[in-house]
Image (cartoon, helix red, strand yellow):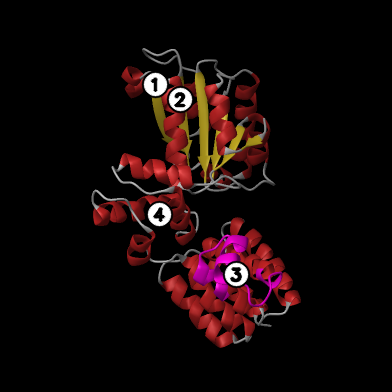
Amino acid sequence: MAEVSLEQFQKKLESGTGVSAALLLGTDTFLRDRLRAVLVEKFVPEAARAWAVSRHSAKDVSVDDVLQNAQSLPMLAPRQVVFVEEADAWERLGEEAREALVEALEKYFDDPAPFTILVFEAAQLDQRMKFAKLLGERALVVKLTLGEESGAPFVMQMAQEMGAVLDAECAEELLDLVNNDLARARTELEKLATYAGKRAITAEDLDALVISSKRYDVWQLADILALRKRDRAMVFLDNLLRNGEQPPALVGAMAWMYRKLLEAQELPAHSPGWQASRQLNMRGNAAEQAIRQSRKIPRKQLLDGLEALGEADSRLKKGKIDQRAVMEFLVARLTA
């Protein structure tokens, strides 16, 4: 099968086209829970969900147990959904066990149970391994990221479910503040809904309550990197990590910053805030800041930085690696 977007996956389910296996890949808990709900609502009647929806963790069960479940007829329902959480745990088995696992799955995929939707979930998988390649070929792969899709409709739906009201512009701004993290957007919405009461949530409410995410923290880092002040950059990094920021997310935020700085270099130096905001798709004050900082850093330094960030991202995704060491090496390279 192929990798599909969130929208394509939902349309495929709605069309009734057969889906025997799926892989939900990523860490966004909101999108994962949403797709879980879509699958269950589509294939299992509400009265039968206690029997026809099962959850396993790959940390605790073998592939044989999962496949036995998948091949057993569901009770009181025409179809069942079998979820396998933390499927990446199977990658850490010994070589012989991994070979046996892949062989068992291949046999199942050759003749899948027609009454079962088998759903694997993983934060990430090593695409060099047979397990990941097999799922990529035989399951419908859905990455739990927004990609090019706007997350505003999701945010507005969350708000509606909470009895709150906000318009599309505020929804986009909230997503911008939380770095497109829908799970965090839900948390912030709960605070905003309480604060706003029965009135609509406004941009002023966002400014008052929502702490800007790491994407804006890294603007402070831009000045440090522009001046190549390695010691200060290391201290800044240490503070972010001590405050619980995750290295992969930091790298993503820094890469976003570098791309925005490159885009800002293409704009006239004295572009008004509203124009820069529209062209960079950023809030006005952040857009003005991006233009100012883009003049301090040579274009080649930004391009080299993007390359270094891409390499750091690849290292972090390999797992079983000292993430702090990767980040410190990255900062050293960016300030070299």
Residue that carries the numbered disc 1 in the rendered image: 52
Q: Mark 3 or mark 4, which has the lower sequence index?
A: 4
| Mark 1 and mark 2: Cα distance apart in space | 6 Å
Residue 60 shows in this picture: no
Which region shows up in magenta? 264-289
Q: Secondary structure at mark 1?
A: helix
Label 3 – label 4 distance at C-alpha: 26 Å
Task: Classify residue 291 as left or right of residue 191.
Answer: right
- Which of labels 3 and 4 is toward the front? 4
| Distance Cα–Cα, label 4 vs label 1 | 31 Å
| Residue 326 screen position, x and y as percent | 60, 69
Q: Amino acid at mark 1?
A: Ala
Of the numbered discs 2 and 4, the one sitting upstream in the chain is 2
Quadrant location of the C terminus?
bottom right
* x then y, percent, for residue 233: 55, 81
Lower position in the chain sequence, tag 1 or tag 2: 1
Residue type, numbered disc 2:
Val
Distance from Cα at disc 3 to Cα at disc 2: 39 Å
Identity of the amino acid at label 4? Arg
